[in-house]
Amino acid sequence: MPRVLALDTATDACTLAWCGEGDLRARHERLARAHNRHILGMLTDILAGRSLASAVDVIACGVGPGSFTGLRVAVSVAQGLAWARDIPIHGFCSLSAQVYSAAALGLLSEGQWVLSTIDAQIGQLYGLWGQWREDHFHAEDAAFICPPELLALPTEPSSVAIIGSGLAYAERFPGQLQQLSTEHPDVTPDAAVMAHRLSTGSLALARQPAYALSPQYVQQTIGWKKLSEQRRHD
């Protein structure tokens, strides 16, 4: 089995994990706007004295969508590590990773529709629709960004699990969606879940050179706000 180093900083969570040789080491911290100050120290911790070159076969990186700065932190760290030691990279969708985190927590049921969300911090949310079937997330379409009022059900589900920080806007969701949904706002991508699935073959690895990795910016033109103008959610 490949030894996988996984990391994601698309949300408030700074999450890293190493899986291989029958072992799993992970760090997962909520560090809003502080990922860059902690990520390398967390990496040193999970490598536990081993060198990157001797311990890692593939670096798996969450590419978003999510925090603009957060995505750049994860991608730049992953690329720098990969280039330095000629290690291949695997990029994964952070919204999909949240679904696998929710499944690992026992929050999803077979055949259930799932809406994975991340607060875009501009009165909108990033989202991805899909269905949980046979221990895998089957995305309905591509990730998107929209105001919460414009969320549209992809079909006529009997229930929907909504996960992630986009639930900060739950009161603005369409009435039908509110009636059908169970809410799990604290779910974030978990590198331990992704590292284990990728290392054991539960999810396929797509090995690429470091230069091929890039953040997934769902919206190319965004009206950015100063930090003082952004809505804060407790």
Image (cartoon, helix red, strand yellow):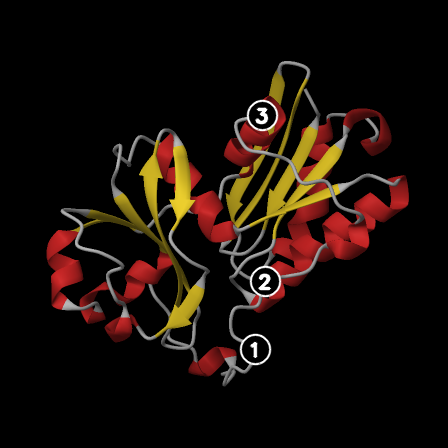
| Residue at point 50%, 32% (across, down) | 193
| Residue at point 48%, 44% (across, down) | 97
- Answer left or right for 171 relative to 30: left
| Residue at point 60%, 58% (across, down) | 34
Which of 114/120 is in front? 114
Which residue is identified by label 2?
216
Which marked residue is nearer to the observer: mark 2 or mark 3? 3
SS at circle 1:
loop
Which residue is identified by label 1?
220
- Viewport quadrant of the C terminus: bottom left
Which residue is identified by label 3?
201
- Answer left or right for 203 relative to 169: right
SS at circle 3:
loop
Quarter of image, res 56: top right
Q: Residues within 10 Å of mark 2 (few under 14, many from 20)?
A: some
| Amino acid at dot 3 | Gly
Mark with earlier residue (1, 3):
3
| Amino acid at dot 1 | Gln
SS at circle 2:
loop
As measured in the structure, the alpha-carbon distance from the residue carrying label 2 to the one carrying label 3 is 24 Å
| Amino acid at dot 2 | Gln
Residue 32 x %, y %? 51, 58
| Residue at point 31%, 30% (across, down) | 106
